[in-house]
Image (spheres, rainbow, N blue to C red):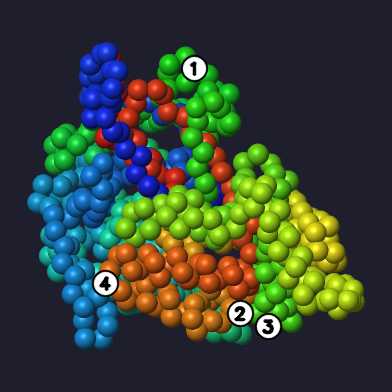
Amino acid sequence: MKRWKKLTALVLALLMLMMTAAGCAQEVEETRGLELRAAFIERPETFDPAYASTEEERTITVHLFENLMKYTAAGLVNGQAAEYTVVTNDDGTETYTFTLRNDIFWSDGVAVKAGDFVHAWQRLVAPQVASPHAAILEMVAGYDEAVKGDVAALQVSAPNDRTFEVTLAERCPYFLSVICTDSATMPVRADVVPAWMSTEEEERDTEEEEAVIAVPELPDWTAKKATLITNGAYSVRNYNAAHLTVVEKEGYYDSHRLSVKELDFFFAESEERAMSSYEKGESDFVLKCGDVEGSVEVMEPEVSALAVNQMSSLNENVRQALTLALDRNAVAAAMGTKFTGMEGLVPRGITTISGSQFRGVNGVILACDEEGVEKNRAHAKELLASMYRGGDIMSRLGVLTLVYENNFLNSRIAQQVKKQWQEVLGISVELVSITAEEMDKALGSGAFTIALMSVSDESNTVTGYLDHYVSDSPDNYGQHYSNAYDMLLRAAMASESVEARDAYLADAERLLLESGYVIPLCGGTYRYLLRDGLMGLICTDMGVYHFSAMTEIVA
């Protein structure tokens, strides 16, 4: 399962424009108190915030649970937190203090306490739990020690039942908007979640003397209605193999924002069944509907890209030529219909800190249209010709080696890259297919010239995609070192101005791609279908859909 992570643009209803549009012969009425039905192809495996990973799982989780902050049609607002303060400490760390509301309750009537957040965040990073989302808290002070087993080192605390404190090791501009809204950091109760803290001493490897922490088979407390205790806007009314039906939780403090009072999630387990339910009027929304008329395309957060080792002998002209010679849509087409060429390293759907679409604001760096591809290819040929004028490119450049992890899609990508470089530039490429373990070793040691890899980030922010390539990043597999690039990322983190931070990040992406050390190729896509007349769908976190504020427009 893929992790579908952080912050897309809001899809909002412009009702007043509809009501005042020229030539409108009928008045329209906004219907609230809806019963909305959503069809999912994949049946979720869990709603546990620490494990929920697919779009389906995380979409349901954000309706069952509520975080410190949340997204509404008005944007980012307080959620379980009534207010917060942030203080910069003398050592450069930052401390956020959240004061919880006094009218928030779990679905069994127990008050939500600050300790529930402490327990959830410690549990998230605990190696015994083995959450795939632990890294989302890497900016919290003490994270490195916590993920090794000392969860008490994570700098989160509850001085009292209504006060939750978090100390960050360094400034994080997206802490509130991403970390404090994410499904992974939702609160959980210690008396509801199965015990996960080990009471036995750690076993030790006698040779390496490193702690070996067992990962127990923990029962899924979200698998049954009786144990699925939640703190969000909705509580469970019915739960079986085919449906999860949730209704507005009695006494929910923000009830006036809930236009949808009942939500039914249908687990169709096939595209045919999902579309059949839609066509019969039994579903209002279908996720991953296929290429259906009227559907909306959404991009996945994982990007396939080539890393060019900075220690290789490939100079800037060659790297730029390799970048410009590629038709990325042709690469995507070789993988199937659910892929598209990348116009930059940051995919569509990722927003700037100020909330705008990053690609929309900063435009195309790598042209994917036919005219742009031909123009780029002509430039690529000129770059090589200027270096090897009067000589054979192959005899001067030699054979390029491209390594990739052996699987069907990677093989398709690698074959396309090889074919295009040979046909456009006359360059010979040797493809080397290796195992996942061998790929990890090659990337970690820098023992490659060009490597095909995937780029994504737990936070799904612009910074998350660019941070991989700062000099001291553990994910800087191409050994990319650039003082100018590092300075742009540091300036973005330090700036008090949102606009300035966004501008620094845009400059950093352009500088990185123009260097040719990172060559984005393609990314996956899927589509969703929403019934006509329904307005107010909010999509955040790249694949998390919020239905609660939706309304229906009727004549």
The residue where tag 3 is placed is 311
Instruction: Give the distance between the C-alpha atoms of the residues marked 2 and 4, in whole angstroms.
Output: 30 Å
* Percent position of residue 134, x then y: 42, 63
Q: Which mark is residue 496?
A: 4
Residue 346 sits above or below residue 451 on the image: above
Q: Amino acid at mark 4?
A: Glu
User: Which image quarter: residue 326?
Assistant: bottom right
The residue where tag 2 is placed is 479
User: Which image quarter: residue 62?
Assistant: top left
The front one of 200 and 551 is 551
- SS for dot 1: helix
Asked if disc 3 and disc 2 are in contact, CB closer than 8 Å, the reply is yes
Q: Amino acid at mark 3?
A: Met
Instruction: Give the distance between the C-alpha atoms of the residues marked 4 and 3, in whole angstroms.
Output: 36 Å
Q: Which mark is residue 279?
A: 1
Question: Can residue 160 be seen in the rendering of this structure?
Answer: yes
Q: Amino acid at mark 2?
A: Gln
Circle 4 residues within 10 Å: few <14, some 14–19, many ≥20:
few
Placement of the C terminus among the 4 image quadrants: top left
